[in-house]
């Protein structure tokens, strides 16, 4: 049996997903059963639909909770943080450039106490 056939079979048995999400079975174990027995109803009766199957969420479900004002505030906060980081990086670079370079050129042969 191929993986594609198994995928098509799983589409006809959506209750199997509840066993995977509850860690009672894995997709690998279901595939092995399918590989051995195919779509024999005797085997698959052991896995009836559970009462607490969560319906799949749709994009519209997420959009109901979407708050554009909240998103705008998060974007503004992120922009402020990036501006602060950019300013700090610029100041640090300026400080490094001005503090490391000596104002008077020192000859290479002159040491500390010379």
Image: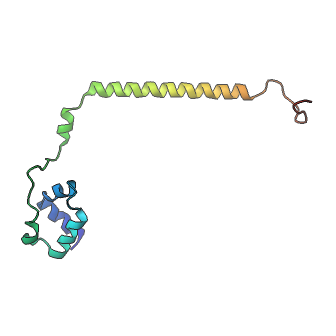
- State the residue in front, 69 or 50: 50
The quadrant of the picture occupied by the N terminus is bottom left
User: Whole-percent x and y of residue 28?
Assistant: 25, 66
The quadrant of the picture occupied by the C terminus is top right
Q: Is 48 left or right of 70, judged from the image as shown?
A: left
Q: Tell which residue pokes out farthest to the right in this image.
A: 114
Tell me which corner region of the image, top left, top right, bottom left or bottom right, holds residue 13.
Answer: bottom left
- Whether residue 60 is situated above or below residue 23 in the rendered picture: above
Judging from the image, the colouring scheme is: rainbow
Tell me which corner region of the image, top left, top right, bottom left or bottom right, holds residue 40.
Answer: bottom left
User: Whole-percent x and y of residue 90?
Assistant: 59, 27
Tell me which corner region of the image, top left, top right, bottom left or bottom right, holds residue 50.
Answer: bottom left
Q: Tell which residue pokes out farthest to the bottom in this image.
A: 36
> How many numbered dots are placed on residues in this image?
0
- Give the residue drawn at x 18%, y 43%: 58
User: Whole-percent x and y of residue 113?
Assistant: 90, 30
- Give the residue drawn at x 16%, y 62%: 10
- Whether residue 25 is situated above or below residue 35 in the rendered picture: above
Q: Tell which residue pokes out farthest to the front in this image.
A: 24
- Give the residue drawn at x 79%, y 23%: 103
User: Whole-percent x and y of residue 45?
Assistant: 7, 66
- Whether residue 2 is situated above or below residue 89 in the rendered picture: below
- State the residue in front, 3 or 15: 15
- Whether residue 27 is situated above or below residue 65 in the rendered picture: below
Q: Is 38 left or right of 83, judged from the image as shown?
A: left
- Give the residue drawn at x 75%, y 28%: 101
């Amino acid at each position: 049996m191929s993986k594609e056939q198994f995928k098509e079979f799983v589409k006809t048995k959506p209750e199997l997903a509840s066993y995977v999400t509850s860690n009672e079975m894995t997709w690998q174990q279901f595939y092995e059963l399918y590989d051995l027995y195919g779509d024999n109803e005797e085997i698959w009766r052991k896995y009836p639909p559970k009462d607490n199957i969560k319906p799949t969420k749709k994009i519209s479900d997420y959009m109901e909770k979407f708050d554009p004002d909240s998103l705008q505030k998060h974007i503004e906060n992120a922009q402020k943080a990036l501006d602060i980081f950019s300013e700090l990086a610029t100041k640090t670079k300026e400080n490094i450039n001005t503090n490391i370079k000596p104002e008077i050129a020192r000859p290479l042969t002159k040491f500390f106490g010379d």
